[in-house]
Image (tube, rainbow, N blue to C red):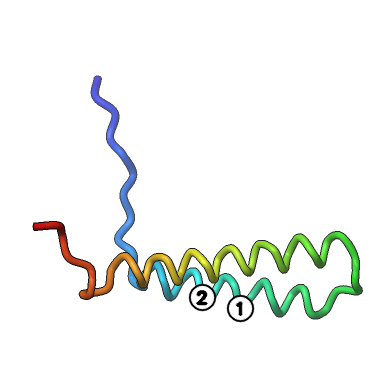
Amino acid sequence: MKKTRNRAKQTTSLQDRLNAFADDIFHKAARLPPGVERDQLLKRARTAEIAADIDQWVSSSGLQSPT
């Protein structure tokens, strides 16, 4: 019996989803007092922003394959 993969069609781009995630995490971190939990949230938000930047760089039209 062959297993099938659950596939979902994304309605928004990866970059938009990562930016929305980072914004949400930044707002949650802003409500917390300084401490370990807040630092961890800020690190996750920065990581999501970096991932969005990398996605934008990879999908830009300026990249060309070597000739």
Q: Is residue 5 above or below residue 31?
A: above
Q: Nearer the viewer, residue 56 or 32?
A: 56
Q: Residue at x 79, y 80 (%)?
A: 30
Crowd tier of the residue under label 2, counting other residues whose Cα lies within 10 Å: few below 14, some 14–19, many 20 or above? many
Q: Residue furthest left?
A: 67
Crowd tier of the residue under label 1, counting other residues whose Cα lies within 10 Å: few below 14, some 14–19, many 20 or above? some
Which quadrant would residue 12 be assigned to in this image?
A: bottom left
Q: Residue at x 52, y 67 (%)?
A: 50
Q: Secondary structure at mark 2?
A: helix
Q: Amino acid at mark 2?
A: Asn
**Residue 19, which numbered label?**
2
Q: Residue furthest front?
A: 67
Q: Residue furthest top?
A: 1
User: Whole-percent x and y of residue 38?
Assistant: 81, 67
User: Whole-percent x and y of residue 61?
Assistant: 21, 74
User: Whole-percent x and y of residue 24?
Assistant: 64, 75
CA separation in Å, label 1 and label 2? 6 Å
Q: Nearer the viewer, residue 17 or 34?
A: 34
Q: Is residue 26 above or below residue 65?
A: below
Left or right of 46? Residue 50 is left
User: Whole-percent x and y of residue 21?
Assistant: 57, 70
Q: Residue at x 69, y 76 (%)?
A: 26
Q: Residue at x 80, y 65 (%)?
A: 39
Q: Nearer the viewer, residue 21 or 44?
A: 44
Left or right of 46? Residue 61 is left
**Which residue position holds label 1?**
23
Q: Amino acid at mark 1?
A: Asp
